[in-house]
Amino acid sequence: MVSIVGGGTAGLFLAAFLNTDLYDITIFEKKPSLGRKFLVAGDGGLNLTHAEDLPNFKLRYTPTLFLDNALDQFSNSDFRAWMRSIGIPTFVGSSGRVFAEKGIKPIEVLKIIESFLQNNKVKFVFNKTFTGWGKDDSLEFNSTECIKTDYAVFNLGGASWKVTGSDGLWLNIFAKKGIATLPFRPSNCAYQIPWDETFIQKHEGSPLKNISLSLANQIQKGEAVITRFGIEGNAIYGLSPSIQATLALHNEVVVYADFKPTISLETLIEKLINSKSNKTVALKETVNLSSTVVDLIKCSLTKDEFLDIKTLAQFIKKFPLMIIGSAPIDEAISTSGGSMLNAVDSNFELKKVKNQFCIGEMLDWDAPTGGYLIQACASMGAYVADQLNSKFNSK
């Protein structure tokens, strides 16, 4: 028997690739239904994976090596092929993100996966909250019921979007078992910036398009949105691991924005020198900066700095954004922290508990949005399924 504790993405893919001729498979879910966070992630379009080539795809993860074997076995191309095989065709958007074919809603994707599992003899048991281990490492649910199993795979999630069941309360249970853990931290979340009040009154909700943000040696291209709280969007999400690490040490961090990443500083200076318009007009018409960026620059520089072409160009190419905090953890798209990676071996098996595994967001790893989160969970599930199928066959 294989017991899958948690009905999230990683658990669903694990169940999909386990051989039900070898094992009885049961998913134990604390909520009344499966895949709740999967559905929330689908708001605005279900981004399943990304079409990026695999070598670069792997570099999106922190740390960069822990997922290599899983991605080699079940890549983004494999993901798309499997989805197509069960009746979910996909397409690649202009940004490289992969979505279910237009007209297929997230709930339909989930229902098709559920039907596949049911047809493959996978059992679902709902309203079962993991509360610890009983005698001989049996699984305890709801503090009263113990289940003995041959293999257990935990897919308990992170600590954001508690309404979906990802409340992170399992962390203390694991720590008491002697399994190495880390506190959860928000990732892929909004970051707090103390905007000038006049600026934010005018530009709250405005986009920053085609920019790049940098911290230390990391550069992330994309878009962001200015909010009263600060800034959010894929351009900032990709820097989350470095931002969070620096905030933990210093309570603030400066991220630099390049508002014209496609042209060099020298070219920008030349454009400004050759423009016969006043500086504000030149920034909008010659440099093609948005009114939002122009106003941000103007409220941040002195008059002399704004009128000095070299200084102005340098600020356009390297504009400091002071981050002083992050959004509450429950508002984050994903979290880091949880079970430390050194608590599991290369096959995701717990070192402290034989024949029991951890997969998904409950492990301490990070990745930006754009399909990388769901792909990681799917790949871990498929990989552990292969390990368990091999274990049976090697007996």
Image: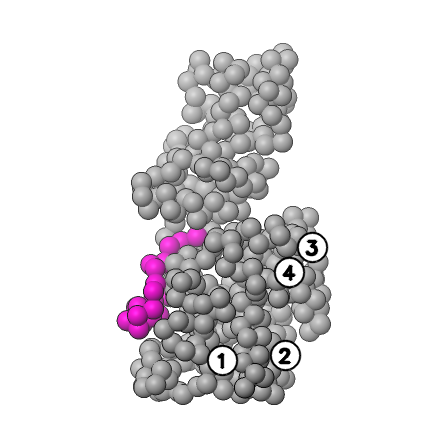
Residue shown at the point (45%, 42%) measured from the top left: 231
On residue 27, the disc is 1
Residue count near mark 1 (Cα–Cα under 10 Å), binned few <14, some 14–19, many ≥20: many
Q: CA distance from mark 3 to mark 2?
A: 24 Å
Which residue is labeled 2 in the image?
116
Which residue is labeled 4 in the image?
76
Residue count near mark 2 (Cα–Cα under 10 Å), binned few <14, some 14–19, many ≥20: some
Amino acid type at mark 4: Asn
Residue 17 included in the magenta stretch of the image: no
Cβ atoms at labels 4 and 3 below 8 Å apart: no
Look at the image and tell me whether residue 305 can be seen: yes
376 and 124: which is toward the camera: 376
Helix, strand or loop under label 4? helix
Q: CA distance from mark 4 to mark 1?
A: 25 Å
Residue shown at the point (47%, 23%) measured from the top left: 298
Residue shown at the point (41%, 18%) measured from the top left: 302
Q: CA distance from mark 3 to mark 1?
A: 31 Å
Look at the image and tell me whether residue 122 can be seen: no
Amino acid type at mark 2: Phe
241 and 126: which is toward the camera: 241
The part of the chain drawn in magenta is 168-187
Quarter of the figure that contains the C terminus = bottom right
Number of numbered discs overlaid on the protein picture: 4
Helix, strand or loop under label 3? strand
Residue shown at the point (57%, 42%) measured from the top left: 222
Helix, strand or loop under label 2? helix
Which residue is labeled 3 in the image?
92
Q: CA distance from mark 2 to mark 1?
A: 14 Å
Asked where in the image residue 321 lies, by quadrant, the reply is top left
